[in-house]
C-alpha cells in the first residue's frame, strides 16, 4: 500500500505481472474510486465545457463519452479528462485523483461565472470500479440484466448492478483492453459488497484484483498518457501528440490561440524499445549514440505481455522517425534503444465501435 494523491492505494495484490496478464488474457478488477467527478448542470453547461476543454463536446450524443483535456492559456495541461453527456444540460467530467482539488478550483475560476451552469464536485459520492479484459463483459453480465453488448466503446448507460438501481455502466477504461467502469454509491458496505460480488462472478474466468502497478504497465503498453509524466503544466498539446483529440483550428478554447501561434514543437513524445539489456525508468536521460543528452524518459518498464523493455520519451523532432537509434543512461551506462510506433500493444479484437469524437 502506498500514498497516491492522498489516498491509501494498493500497488499490487498477487503480483504486478500476474495482474497485468489477467487483464490481457482474462479479466481484472480495479478500485479507481480515487478519480474525481465534476458535474456541470444547467443550460450553460455545454458552453462552459467547450470553453474549458480541447475536444468538441457538441458532437456528443446523450450516453456518449469522449477523451479531452483542460489546458492553461499557454497550451500546457491542467489535466486530461473524460467528458460524459448525461443530457443537453448535464455533463460529468472524470478527472485525475492527484489533481482533483487543483482541477476543481481551475474549473471554478475559468467558467464558474458562466450563465446557466452549476458546477459541483461529487467525487466523494461515487465508488468507481473498473472491470477490464477480454472476459470483462461475461463477468459483469452475471451481475446485471443490462444488455452490455449494446454499449459501444466510449458509450454508457444506466442499469441495475448487484441489485443496485441507477448504476452508471460505461464502456471505458485505462488498460488498452475492452472493459467497463461502473459508478455506484460510495458508502463502504455497498462498495465492499459489490467488490466481492464482482470477484466471485469473475472467478471462473480467472479474475484477479489489480493495483496501481498493473494499471501503470497496462496503460504504458497502450501508450496512454499519465498526468505528471507524458502530460503536465510544462508540456503542451502538440508536444504530447494529442491534437487528434482536440478541435484545434476549428473552434476557440482555452489555450488554443497560444498553440496556433506558437509554431511547430521542437520535441515530441515517442515510443522506445530497448535494444540492449537495460530498463529505461521514469526520468532517465535519453542521449544520442555519442552520449549527448537530448531528452528524457516519461514512463518506462518491462512489458509483461510483450516481454520487452519499453518506454515513452520526449526527444527532438528530428529523432522521432521509427527505427531511429538513441541511448538511455541507465545507472551511468549508455544503453541502446530505438524509436518504435505506438501504441506498443493493440488488442486484436474490439467491441462495436461508435463514430470517434
Image (cartoon, rainbow, N blue to C red):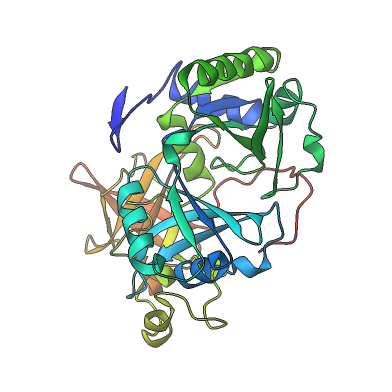
The structure residue drawn at horizontal position 78% and vertical position 32%, both measured from the top left corner, is 146
Q: Is residue 244 left or right of residue 308?
A: right
Pinpoint residue 95: horizontal percent, then vertical percent. Answer: 44, 49
- Quarter holding the C terminus is bottom right
The structure residue drawn at horizontal position 81% and vertical position 35%, both measured from the top left corner, is 147
Residue 302: in sight, yes or no? no
Pinpoint residue 8: horizontal percent, then vertical percent. Answer: 32, 26
Q: Foreground residue, 172 or 265?
A: 172
Q: Is residue 38 left or right of residue 291?
A: right
Query: Is residue 109 shown above or below 173?
Result: below
Q: Foreground residue, 357 or 224?
A: 357
Q: Residue furthest left?
A: 332
The structure residue drawn at horizontal position 58% and vertical position 45%, both measured from the top left corner, is 345
- Quarter holding the N terminus is top left
Residue 338: in sight, yes or no? yes
Query: Is residue 181 shown above or below 323?
Result: above
Query: Is residue 324 shown above or below 157?
Result: below
Q: Residue furthest bottom?
A: 261
Q: Is residue 272 left or right of residue 47?
A: left
Pinpoint residue 24: horizontal percent, then vertical percent. Answer: 61, 32
Pinpoint residue 175: horizontal percent, then vertical percent. Answer: 55, 40
Residue 161: image quadrant is top right
Q: Is residue 153 left or right of residue 250?
A: right
The structure residue drawn at horizontal position 33% and vertical position 61%, both measured from the top left corner, is 106
Query: Is residue 58 shown above or below 354?
Result: below
Amino acid at each position: 500500500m502506498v500514498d497516491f494523491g492522498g489516498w491509501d492505494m494498493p500497488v499490487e495484490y498477487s503480483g504486478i505481472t500476474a495482474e497485468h496478464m489477467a487483464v490481457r488474457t482474462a479479466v481484472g478488477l480495479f478500485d479507481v474510486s480515487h478519480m474525481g467527478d465534476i458535474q456541470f448542470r444547467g443550460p450553460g453547461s455545454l458552453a462552459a465545457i467547450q470553453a474549458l476543454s480541447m475536444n468538441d463536446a457538441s458532437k456528443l450524443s446523450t450516453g456518449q463519452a469522449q477523451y479531452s483535456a483542460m489546458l492553461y492559456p499557454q497550451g500546457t495541461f491542467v489535466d486530461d479528462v473524460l467528458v460524459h453527456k448525461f443530457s443537453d444540460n448535464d455533463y460529468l467530467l472524470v478527472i485525475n485523483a492527484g489533481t482533483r482539488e487543483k482541477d476543481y478550483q481551475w474549473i471554478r475560476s475559468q467558467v464558474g461565472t458562466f450563465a446557466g451552469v452549476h458546477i459541483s464536485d461529487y467525487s466523494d459520492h461515487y465508488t468507481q470500479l473498473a472491470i477490464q479484459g477480454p472476459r470483462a463483459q461475461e463477468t459483469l453480465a452475471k451481475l446485471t440484466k443490462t444488455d452490455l453488448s449494446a454499449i459501444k466503446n466510449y458509450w454508457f448507460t444506466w442499469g441495475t448492478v448487484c441489485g443496485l438501481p441507477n448504476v452508471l455502466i460505461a464502456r471505458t477504461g485505462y488498460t488498452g483492453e475492452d472493459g467497463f467502469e461502473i459508478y455506484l454509491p460510495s458508502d463502504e458496505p455497498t462498495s465492499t459488497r459489490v467488490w466481492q460480488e464482482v470477484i466471485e462472478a469473475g472467478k471462473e474466468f480467472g479474475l484477479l484484483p489489480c493495483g496501481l502497478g498493473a494499471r501503470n504497465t497496462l496503460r504504458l503498453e497502450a501508450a496512454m498518457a499519465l498526468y505528471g509524466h507524458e502530460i503536465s503544466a510544462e508540456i503542451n498539446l502538440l508536444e504530447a501528440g494529442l491534437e487528434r483529440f482536440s478541435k484545434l483550428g476549428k473552434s476557440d478554447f482555452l489555450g488554443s490561440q497560444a498553440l496556433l501561434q506558437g509554431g511547430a514543437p521542437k520535441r515530441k513524445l515517442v515510443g522506445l524499445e530497448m535494444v540492449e539489456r537495460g530498463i529505461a525508468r521514469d526520468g532517465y536521460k535519453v542521449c544520442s549514440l555519442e552520449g549527448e543528452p537530448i531528452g528524457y524518459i516519461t514512463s518506462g518498464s518491462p512489458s509483461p505481455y510483450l516481454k520487452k523493455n519499453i518506454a515513452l520519451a520526449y526527444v527532438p523532432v528530428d529523432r522521432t522517425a521509427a527505427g531511429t537509434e538513441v541511448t538511455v543512461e541507465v545507472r551511468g551506462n549508455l544503453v541502446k534503444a530505438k524509436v518504435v510506433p505506438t501504441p506498443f500493444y493493440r488488442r486484436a479484437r474490439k467491441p462495436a465501435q461508435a463514430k470517434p469524437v
